[in-house]
Amino acid sequence: MTAPIPRDIPDLPVIPGRRTNLMPSSAPAGAVAPPVRRPLTATYRLLLALAAIAAVTVEILLGSPARVLSHFTIQSTLLLAVVTLASARRAWTARRPLPGALTGAALLYVVAAALLHHVLLADAAPAYTMTGTAEPADLTGPAGTLAALAPPTLHTVLPIAAVLDWLLLSPPARIRLAHAAAWLLCPTAYLVFTLLRGLFLPAGPARYLYPFQDTDRHGHLYVLGVSLLLLLVLYCLAVTLIAVDRTRPDPLRLGAKTGFRLQPPVG
């Protein structure tokens, strides 16, 4: 006959020299807490994508579609719109986020295009436009208003909105340093494309998409040096993005509840 189990079990003494610290867990948040719908995040990303599509549409309507679509700003903005729409759908349906290599590339390209515009193109003479036609001041009515709003939206509003979405609404994606080199493949191919485009087009204002690529004015060595410098700056920007992503806190886990609770003993 076994002895009865006491209702209150006394606390066991601590074993000297032994520590019971728990090891940190590397399990993802989805393994602990079930995914939840985030309608506000989905709405924000939907508005961001619609603004990107609207700004690109205005630029295409104001100029030659082939010339406008050849600009890196337009291509990076379209990529941002597609990625943001997909991210909005996943946030609305409580699915896992997109791969960090994809979202990081979209963010890197749109931020790099914005920095390129503000550093090298904003004060260029003659004035730089992606349409290659009329300036916003030369247009009147709704067309003038849209033409005046599209450039700051592309070069300032959308990059800032994308950075805020990354910092405040997206979890760290555990991006590896190898992604920085992979992200350079597309810009490198784009630079080669724009240089070859200028070689085969006849002389004129539409020959080169960017003033610093004008080999007739600056020479081949200058254009090559600027292109290599841009790739180096882009790589440094990519490494910075990866470093920040690996050290920043997860905004989705701040204050999140895991669902595990300690209950008082029964009886």
Image (cartoon, rainbow, N blue to C red):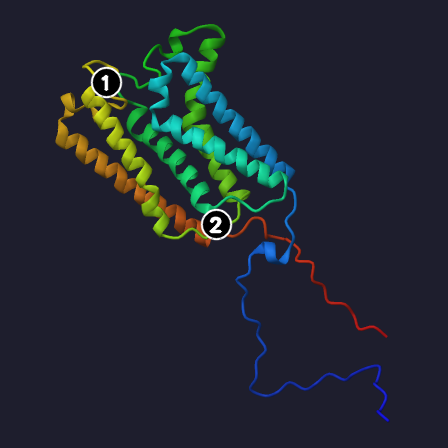
Q: Disc 1 and disc 2: Cα gap in Å?
A: 40 Å
Task: Report how many numbered discs are placed on residues in the image.
Answer: 2
For marks 1 and 2 on the same chain, the one whose residue lies earlier in the sequence:
2
Q: Quadrant of residue 205?
A: top left
Q: Are marks 1 and 2 in contact (CB under 8 Å)?
A: no
Which residue lies at the image location 59% right of the left edge and 88% below the top edge?
16
Task: Identify which amino acid the numbered label 2 is placed on.
Answer: Ala
- Does 181 sit above or below residue 160? below
Side (left or right) of 54 relative to 241 = right
Which residue lies at the image location 76% right of the left edge and 67% below the top edge?
263
Assign the N terminus to one quadrant of the image: bottom right
Q: Quadrant of residue 60?
A: top left
| Residue occupied by mark 1 | 207
Which residue lies at the image location 23% right of the left edge and 34% below the top edge?
227
- Does 158 sit above or below residue 30? above
Q: In this view of the protein, which residue sits in the foreground, 82 or 140? A: 82
Task: Identify which amino acid the numbered label 1 is placed on.
Answer: Arg
Which residue lies at the image location 46% right of the left edge and 30% below the top edge?
158
* Spot occupied by residue 113 in the image (x, y as percentages of width and height): 36, 31
* Spot occupied by residue 104 in the image (x, y as percentages of width and height): 43, 43
| Residue occupied by mark 2 | 173
Secondary structure of residue under mark 2:
loop
- Does 206 sit above or below residue 249? above
